[in-house]
Amino acid sequence: MVVVVELVQVSLILGVAVQVGLVRVLQSLQTQEQVPQEEP
């Protein structure tokens, strides 16, 4: 049972890490797209 709990915790941590990574990638892409628009 302990192994199952550890696997669940690891999966949750990986899920959160993936979500944070995707959010950072999306934000970086948005900033790169907005920078040229802000330039005169």
Image (cartoon, rainbow, N blue to C red):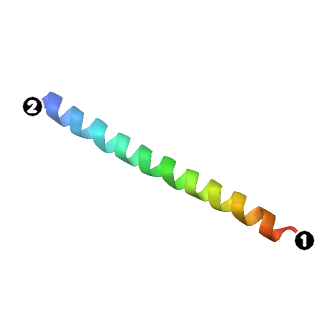
Furthest residue in direction right, as rendered:
40
Q: Is 15 on the left-hand or right-hand side of 33?
A: left
Q: CA distance from mark 1 to mark 2?
A: 61 Å
Instruction: Determine whether 37 is above or below 20 in the image.
Output: below
Front one among 26 and 17: 26
Q: Secondary structure at mark 2?
A: loop
Instruction: Determine whether 40 is above or below 6 in the image.
Output: below
Name the kind of residue labelled 2 in the image. Answer: Met
Q: Secondary structure at mark 1?
A: loop
Q: Which residue is mark 2?
A: 1
Query: Residue 31 at x, y = what percent?
Result: 69, 60
Residue visible at 16% across and 28% down in the picture: 3
Q: Is 29 on the left-hand or right-hand side of 2?
A: right
Q: Which residue is mark 1?
A: 40
Front one among 35 and 10: 35
Circle 2: is it few (<14), some (14-19), or many (20+) Cα within 10 Å?
few
Query: Residue 37 at x, y = what percent?
Result: 78, 69
Residue visible at 30% across and 36% down in the picture: 10
Q: Nearer the viewer, mark 1 or mark 2?
A: 1
Using the rendered view, name the quadrant where residue 1 is placed: top left
